[in-house]
Image (cartoon, coloured by chain):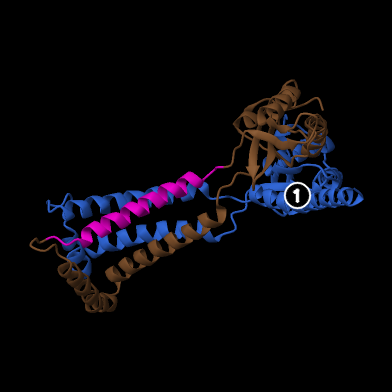
Chain colours: A blue, B brown
Amino acid sequence: MSSRVDAGARRSRREEDRRTEGQGPDMRRVAYRETHSSRAAVAIVAAVLVTVLAAYGLLEAAVHAIGQPAWLIEPQVAAQRLVELPAGISPLLLGAVGAVLAMAGLIFLLNGVLPGRRARHLLAGTGQASGGPAVVVDDEVIASSLARRARLAANVTPEQVMVVVSQRQVLVNVRPMSGVPVDGGTVLAAVQDELDQMELEPSPEARVNVTPTGVIGA
Amino acid sequence: MNSTPSLLNRILLTVLGLMLLAAGILLVLLATVPPVGAWWQSWSPGIWDGINQAFNATRFPGRTESWLWIVVALVLLLLIGLMVAWIAQQGKGRSSLLAAEYDPGDVPGDVRIGGGVAEQALKHALAGRPDLAGSTVATYDVKGSPALKVRLLPRQGVAPHLLAAEIAGLLAALEAVVGKETPVLIHIGAGARTRFGRAERVR
């Protein structure tokens, strides 16, 4: 009897272990996937391109296999032309075709090789550490929140503040009202306070830029 | 969150990109550098002759066509099938069940809770909020276990961390109702509706 209870307890503990173990890295992976592009759109474009080319090849091959005349160009003729290449076509056209092909190849290659980071940040504060949900925020939302805070600190209208949020940097541009000085230090302190509360990951560095020329009638 | 095969996408895109890039550079070089043209004309006929011989050796008895064409057609058909399968893999992963477990209670049997429960409950809880321009809740299947994705579109100027904390409270309540811990991802995003809508001024 006792052994059965023991076994049950051990099993449930193991299940619990597995769950917490499985959940930690799992959510990190989910967060990674959410902050990086999956390249689904480019992949679909590439697949459609290959499909169209293959369909044309299939058509010509099938037509040839049953002994009918070719639709656009006889494969043998095409291959013969390829073999004799620099001759038979104007170098300008050949170069242009090559450049277009190379360009398309470069786009696909860079899409495959570059990290593909999206303009998003993770919020660490409410994150997995406290057992809560993983939170991913678009940089645009962060920027508009910081702009609101900077506007209140500088006491200007919304149009006079522009915030640019990138992966590791936050740039706050303030255009003060002409004749009313704006203290960059206060704005920076307010923005920094907001950033500290957000606990972004990767954490960006804030900079405030007060333009020397003011605006009139704002 | 969805099960788009991002690694496969990267590999296939890289391979395709390299092939296209190599072909394009070869064409440009053929057009611009004469020695490359000379090399190409001395190198490629050998390959072409080999292919021609293969086709000649595989004729149907008594006819002029080669059965290699049928092989080529089948290979291309297979390639098209693979490409369609690749497209079908993109963006997969939605599921309809929030929880499915064997219940060893008085009445033995499976208990299944649909994803609609979470979706409706959260939508209802979020409906009256003035600081949100929109929200969607979806259930996903992440490696066999259900997970929730909450996408919020806050109005301009809403502090994301405060919003996230409030939603986390709602989710905790939902967890208490469902009785099972589900991994949740909150995505606070921006869209056309938040960009052109009125700003949030009260908070």
In the rendered image, the residue lying farthest to the top is B128
Residue at 33% across, 62% down: A98
Q: Position of residue B76 (x, y in %)?
A: 31, 55
Would residue B192 be found to the left or right of residue A139 on screen? left
Residue at 47% across, 57% down: B13
In the rendered image, the residue lying farthest to the left is B62
Q: Nearer the viewer, residue B83 or B151?
A: B83
> In the figure, B160 relative to A195: above or below?
above
Q: Amino acid at mark 1?
A: Gln
Query: Is residue B74 part of the magenta span, yes or no?
Result: yes
According to the picture, the residue beneath numbered tag 1 turns out to be: A23
Would residue A131 be found to the left or right of residue B25 on screen? right
Query: Is residue A86 part of the magenta span, yes or no?
Result: no
Q: Nearer the viewer, residue B193 or B173?
A: B173
Residue at 19% across, 74% down: B49
Q: Nearer the viewer, residue A99 or A160?
A: A99
Q: Nearer the viewer, residue A152 or A87?
A: A87
Q: Position of residue A168 (x, y in %)?
A: 72, 55
Looking at the rendering, which quadrant does residue A87 occupy?
A: bottom left
In the rendered image, the residue lying farthest to the front is A1
* One can see residue B136 in this view: no
Where disc 1 sits, the SS reads helix
Q: Which residues are magenta?
A: B65-92
In which quadrant will I find the C terminus of chain B?
top right
